């Protein structure tokens, strides 16, 4: 019974028909309930497939012809991720949106659309036919666009949402061109038709089709230089949605790329190196820009780009492994990519939820104004710390496991191939190590400034800890993060089926048997690490039992009247970095006059960071286009007489043309 | 066994550095056991905590210490196998040290002192710049030996040709410089300076006292001994247990004396020059890599 893939639609129908007719609070729980229905009916077949069952499929009779919903292992893996994060986000949203009790109509629309958005992401992974795929893809983009608009009265939200809307459609254009081109070459319009491309149309055409799809999906997942929507849209959205967007929506792009990569066996090596270049640039550029951000949510958004880069390195390595016929490399690459996809969606949604708690407690996400929240919001700060350690790829949490798998693959690759390959791989290793170091810099800054030290601003309302409805999903996600970190062998077993789509099953078993001992070594080390902490902590407690423990002010090196504004700021923490990477990251300082009676002229300073790629690729050309089109503005002068004259002129021209035609 | 050896080295060799430095500057110097005595005294003392700090400040030294001990568990010492050895354990090693650094930075930020924030920022930068060098170096060793764990790499290197020992020397030199960066010694950081503005590691721990400070001192000494062990492992050829121990202690002693020499005859770099120095480690690692590539005639 649960094998029918149309059942999740029950949840959507339920949401659309029922939710708008209830009071907001009840509507919210109805919306969550609908999501649960969707999740249950999609997770059951997904689990069946992941545990080794056959591909689940449901025929779809439409007015345009016969189609099929197909749930294979790769879809199943992404369905699991989508469901975890969407449910967590929906639950978290109940309390988050409870802060807007007077926006009844908006709330109802928002609650009704959340399950639609959730289901559309699931159906994207189920469709093999590209036209239907693009239709559902469009539903996904539109519903998320409307969801972002919730806080539209906040400055910049409308602009960010419009930006998102436009860029998503640029992505669709690429996908459509790709589909048409595919249809033109093979006569088919499904992902599986791509596999036949090299025989029917040659390798170059096949590569071209791949590139079209890669750019289309790359815009969605935020690869450099297609990332520019991401740092605007994520901060603008309400936090539960930022969590879902950063956790899952960009992963749907990754899903698309993986689908296309699997279907392009002819050009694996070229594809691998192309993705590798994009991925390494994304990883480095994403984290570099993240460091100089003052907006906590924007910082997290740039970090998503970095993590997409790490996932991309995994995919690229997998593709190279397939291209060179090395199954160990293919296994490590794809396993790292798939696991990092899951891991990133976990810790990034956790971080975004924490940022949401901070925003609702203080009313700002500007890092420079925050400080000392750790004492007022102990749970939020603990969640953020765990998310931060995980995202930096540090043991013993889950981020380390996926980065470790990718590192293992890279080290394996180093001595397998020729000179240029070896050299490229060592560069990737250096890049990945640098990304890790930069991430530590970034998150010690974020955590240290926001949650540590003393408050930098006096807020009108004293910040308070978030309620349990917000904390419960965060706790669940934390539990997942910790358990993946401590028991990586279990999650590797789950990944066997999805990996089987790329690597032959005999080889997986082969590599896995060797790799399991490595992973259990890591598990053991993590356990020992925890044990040592415990032992030393107990010794410390015993040693401190009899001695005097005093409290005092922070040592000011002789200065006796320090105040909170003298603390190190986020800008100064990142200053050395900014100076070192000056050509790549630009920060602009504005001097603002303060008008008051002072003995001398005084200024206040503001600094803004710039995304150079956005400036050069989007804003710059756009400005030129606007300037060019501005020349025609004289025609639109707002006078009815002129417009009547244009109509009159138009008729005359038509008549004259008609006259000459005869 | 290995950990015990490393801990003993860690307890004694800061003293050796101090003695050597004192002799070089014509003083008598404290005894070999003075740092150990300091630590013991600190462990028994009470503590003063800043009002600004929270739980993280109290737990961070413990976690950093545990991270360094855990990292040392994957290191073999010559004939003695590591407690646990797996493919890619050097990645685990360096990331575990990264976790230790993460915690100490976060703890420094907890005090809300601008001095400690400054030290934290510097520590984060230097760590970030140094990490790639270590991984590139081990990438070259993987390329050279075809193995992926500390134990296998060192065994292959020790049983190798003269070229292998050449590589070993260069790698040891690189790790020696890396140690100076990671353990905050001259010429990157001056542990004896009196001016907070020019400190890196020292300024981060201004507010730690008592047991926690003792733990931090011990962690730093351990870090030193752990890197010394990595260096020594390049040269511990197959020998009987006692000879191996003798060589191991000898190499650690040489490293300590070398550090003392560097500290006696060099001044600290200007802060802005530190990134250049640390980045040169990465280029050195690349040089080793290219050298191996050429040697293998790929």
Image (spheres, coloured by chain):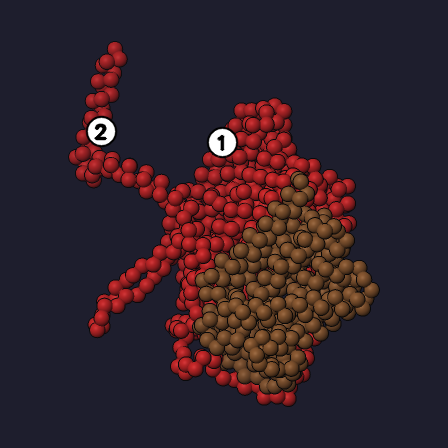
Image x and y of residue A55, in percent: 70, 40
| Residue A60: numbered disc | none
Whether residue A445 is visible here, answered yes or no, is yes
Quarter occupied by the N terminus of chain A: top right
What is the tally of numbered marks visible in this picture? 2
Within 10 Å of the Cα at label 2, are there few (<14), some (14-19), or many (20+) other Cα atoms? few
> Which chain is in red here?
A
Describe the element under mark 1 as helix, strand or loop: helix
Mark closest to the chain's N terminus, 2 or 1: 1
Point out the residue furthest to the top here. A662
Image x and y of residue A175, in percent: 51, 35
Mark 1 chain: A
| Residue A177: numbered disc | 1
Q: Nearer the viewer, residue A159 or A374?
A: A374
Per the image, the residue denoted by label 2 is A647
Within 10 Å of the Cα at label 1, are there few (<14), some (14-19), or many (20+) other Cα atoms? some
Residue B202, above or below B78: below
Q: Nearer the viewer, residue B116 or A517?
A: B116
Answer with left or right where residue A601 lies relative to residue B139. left
Image x and y of residue A534, in percent: 68, 73
Describe the element under mark 2 as helix, strand or loop: helix
Quarter occupied by the C terminus of chain A: top left
Q: Nearer the viewer, residue A81 or B70?
A: B70
Q: Nearer the viewer, residue B271 or A497?
A: B271
Point out the residue furthest to the left here. A641
Image x and y of residue B268, in percent: 50, 68
Question: Which marked residue is nearer to the observer: mark 2 or mark 1?
Answer: 1
Question: Residue drawn at (62%, 67%), measured in percent from left and top?
Answer: B258
Residue A217, above or below A466: above
> Which chain is in brown here?
B
């Amino acid at each position: 019974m649960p094998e029918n893939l149309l059942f999740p639609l029950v949840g959507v129908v339920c949401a659309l028909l029922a939710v708008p007719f209830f009071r907001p609070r009840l509507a919210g729980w109805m919306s969550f309930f609908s999501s649960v229905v969707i999740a249950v009916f999609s997770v059951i077949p997904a689990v069946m497939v992941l545990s080794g069952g056959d591909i689940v499929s449901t025929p779809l009779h439409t007015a345009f012809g016969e189609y099929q919903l197909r749930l294979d292992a790769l879809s199943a893996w992404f369905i699991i991720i989508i469901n975890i994060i969407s449910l967590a986000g929906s639950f978290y949203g109940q309390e988050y949106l409870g802060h807007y009790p007077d926006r009844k109509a908006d709330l109802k629309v928002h609650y009704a659309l959340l399950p639609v958005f959730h289901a559309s992401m699931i159906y994207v992974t189920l469709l093999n036919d590209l036209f239907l795929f693009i239709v559902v893809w469009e539903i996904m983009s539109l519903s998320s666009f409307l969801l972002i608009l919730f806080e539209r009265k906040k400055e910049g939200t409308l602009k960010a949402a419009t930006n998102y809307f436009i860029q998503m459609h640029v992505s669709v254009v690429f996908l459509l061109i790709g589909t048409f081109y595919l249809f033109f070459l093979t006569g088919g319009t499904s992902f599986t038709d791509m596999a036949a491309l090299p025989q029917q149309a040659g390798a170059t055409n096949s590569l071209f089709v791949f590139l079209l799809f890669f750019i289309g999906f790359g815009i969605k997942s935020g690869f450099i230089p297609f990332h520019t929507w991401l740092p605007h849209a994520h901060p603008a959205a309400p936090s539960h949605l930022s969590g879902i967007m950063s956790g899952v929506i960009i992963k749907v792009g990754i899903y698309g790329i993986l689908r296309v990569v699997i279907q392009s066996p002819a050009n694996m090596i070229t594809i691998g190196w192309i993705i590798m270049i994009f991925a390494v640039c994304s990883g480095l550029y994403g984290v570099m820009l993240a460091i100089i951000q003052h907006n906590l949510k924007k910082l997290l958004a740039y970090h998503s780009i970095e993590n997409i880069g790490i996932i991309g390195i995994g995919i690229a390595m997998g593709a190279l492994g397939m291209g060179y016929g090395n199954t160990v490399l293919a296994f490590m690459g794809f396993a790292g990519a798939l696991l990092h996809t899951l891991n990133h969606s976990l810790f990034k949604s956790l971080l975004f939820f924490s940022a949401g708690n901070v925003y609702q407690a203080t009313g700002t996400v500007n890092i420079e104004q925050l400080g000392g929240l750790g004492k007022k919001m102990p749970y939020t700060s603990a969640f953020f710390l765990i998310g931060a350690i995980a995202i930096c790829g540090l043991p013993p949490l889950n981020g380390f496991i996926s980065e470790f798998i990718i590192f293992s693959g890279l080290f394996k690759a180093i001595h397998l191939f020729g000179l240029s390959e070896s050299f490229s791989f060592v560069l990737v290793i250096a890049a990945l190590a640098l990304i890790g170091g930069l991430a530590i810099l970034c998150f010690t800054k974020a955590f240290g400034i926001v949650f540590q030290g003393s408050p930098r601003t006096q807020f009108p309302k004293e910040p308070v800890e978030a309620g349990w409805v917000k904390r419960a999903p965060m706790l669940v996600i934390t539990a997942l993060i910790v358990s993946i970190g401590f028991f990586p062998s279990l999650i590797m077993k789950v990944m066997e089926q999805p990996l089987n789509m790329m690597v032959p099953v005999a080889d997986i078993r082969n590599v896995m048997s060797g790799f399991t001992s490595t992973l259990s070594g890591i598990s053991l080390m993590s356990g020992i690490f925890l044990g040592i902490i415990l032992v030393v902590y107990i010794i410390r407690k015993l040693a401190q039992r009899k001695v005097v423990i005093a409290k005092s002010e922070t040592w000011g090196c002789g200065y006796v009247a320090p105040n909170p504004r003298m603390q190190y700021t986020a800008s100064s923490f990142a200053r050395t970095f900014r100076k070192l990477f000056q050509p790549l990251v630009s920060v602009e300082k504005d001097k603002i006059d303060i008008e008051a009676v002072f003995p001398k002229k005084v200024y206040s300073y503001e600094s803004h960071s710039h995304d150079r790629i956005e400036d050069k690729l989007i804003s710059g050309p756009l400005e030129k286009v606007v300037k060019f089109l501005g020349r025609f503005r004289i025609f639109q002068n707002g006078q009815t007489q002129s417009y009547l004259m244009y109509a009159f002129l138009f008729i005359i021209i038509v008549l004259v043309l008609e006259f000459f035609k005869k | 066994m290995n950990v015990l050896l490393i801990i003993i080295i860690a307890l004694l060799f800061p003293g050796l550095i101090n003695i050597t430095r004192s002799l070089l500057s014509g003083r008598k110097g404290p005894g070999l056991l003075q740092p150990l005595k300091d630590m013991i005294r600190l462990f028994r003392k009470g503590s003063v905590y800043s009002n600004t700090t929270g739980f993280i400040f109290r737990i961070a030294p413990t976690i950093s210490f545990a991270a360094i001990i855990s990292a040392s568990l994957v290191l073999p010492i010559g004939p003695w196998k590591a407690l646990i050895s797996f493919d890619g354990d050097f990645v685990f090693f360096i990331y575990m040290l990264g976790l230790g650094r993460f915690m100490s930075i976060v703890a420094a930020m907890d005090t809300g002192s601008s001095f400690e924030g400054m030290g934290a920022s510097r520590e984060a930068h230097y760590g970030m710049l140094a990490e790639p060098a270590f991984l590139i170096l081990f990438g070259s060793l993987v390329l050279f030996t075809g193995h992926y764990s500390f134990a296998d790499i060192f065994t292959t290197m020790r049983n190798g040709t003269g070229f292998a020992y050449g590589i070993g020397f260069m790698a040891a030199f690189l790790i020696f410089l890396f140690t100076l960066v990671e353990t905050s010694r001259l010429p990157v950081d001056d542990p004896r300076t009196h001016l907070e503005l020019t400190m890196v590691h020292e300024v981060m721990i201004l507010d730690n006292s008592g047991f926690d400070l003792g733990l931090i001192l011990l962690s730093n000494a351990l870090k030193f001994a752990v890197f010394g062990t990595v260096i020594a492992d390049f040269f511990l050829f197959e020998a009987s247990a006692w000879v191996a121990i003798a060589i191991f202690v000898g190499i650690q002693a040489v490293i300590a004396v070398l550090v003392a020499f560097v500290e006696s005859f060099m001044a600290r770099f200007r802060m802005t020059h530190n990134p250049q120095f640390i980045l040169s480690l990465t280029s050195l690692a690349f040089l080793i890599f290219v050298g191996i590539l050429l040697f293998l005639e790929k």
